[in-house]
Image: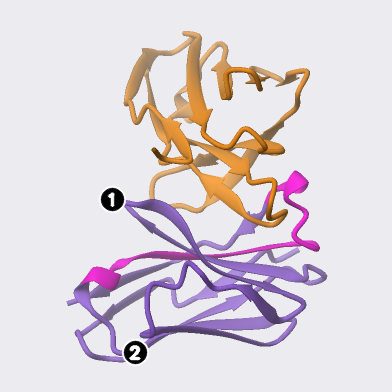
Amino acid sequence: RKEVEQDPGPFNVPEGATVAFNCTYSNSASQSFFWYRQDCRKEPKLLMSVYSSGNEDGRFTAQLNRASQYISLLIRDSKLSDSATYLCVVNLSNSSYKLIFGSGTRLLVRP
Amino acid sequence: DAGVIQSPRHEVTEMGQEVTLRCKPISGHNSLFWYRQTMMRGLELLIYFNNNVPIDDSGMPEDRFSAKMPNASFSTLKIQPSEPRDSAVYFCASSHSGQTVYGYTFGSGTRLTVV
């Protein structure tokens, strides 16, 4: 089983739609969680951290469910510029520096 | 802040040749990471340096790969001899004291093609 699993997509949605991605992780002791965004042929960039109580940044909302070991990202009012691959990232508790990246979920927002 | 700087951006080389990838981390960051990204395997951590010392090289595929960090502002990843299966995008990332809570900053990557 992969340490971090994501649906590869693609999710193809119209502008203005709300879309949600889920991600599951295998290590129950994982401590830190993130969503990164990667545009085609570019480097990954930190989108937002995921806090235990859930957190929001503009149109983006991240949730953590430790009991079920999954993380979600909700994007409201999708823009064309949201088209990218979204990487779920987990920090393993036994090595504070090591981030494990999921393979990513591809989002296409159409006009 | 110039960010993490990698060179070259693209490298095409013939099988058997030596390849050297370069990275300059963000000034003040003392943790440096080399990642490799392929369609099949996604992003994989190759090696992690803290204060210029290699801490974890368990992700380095084999002896053909080596990495150095002679000072706080420079690191290299060398492949010798290169093989077609080494074709991938290689990213360097840096952070402060490995503080993952703030995530890492990635460089633009080096796209390596071995023919």
The stretch of residues the image draws in magenta is B85-103
Which chain can be seen in orange?
Answer: A
Residue pictured at 29% horizontal, 72% vertical: B86
Asked if the stretch drawn in magenta spans residue B99, the answer is: yes
Instruction: Judge by depth and name the residue closer to the eye, B107 or A52.
Output: A52
**Labelled pair 2, 1 in contact (Cβ < 8 Å):** no
Q: Mark 1 lies on which chain?
A: B
Which chain can be seen in purple?
Answer: B
Whole-percent x, y for residue B81 in the image: 29, 89
Asked if the stretch drawn in magenta spans residue A41, the answer is: no
Q: Classify residue A69 as left or right of residue B26.
A: left
As shown in the figure, which amino acid type bears the numbered disc 2?
Answer: Gln
Determine the CA span between mark 2 and mark 1. 23 Å
Per the image, the residue denoted by label 2 is: B80
N-terminal of the two: label 2 or label 1?
1
Q: Quadrant location of residue A105? A: top left
- Does any portion of residue A85 appear in the rendered image? no
Residue pictured at 48% horizontal, 13% vertical: A19
Residue pictured at 44% horizontal, 53% vertical: B43
Dot 1: element = loop
Q: Classify residue B89 as left or right of residue B77.
A: left
Whole-percent x, y for residue B84 in the image: 20, 74
Sort mark 2 into few (<14), some (14-19) or many (20+) by Cα contacts within 10 Å: some
Q: Quadrant location of residue A75? A: top right
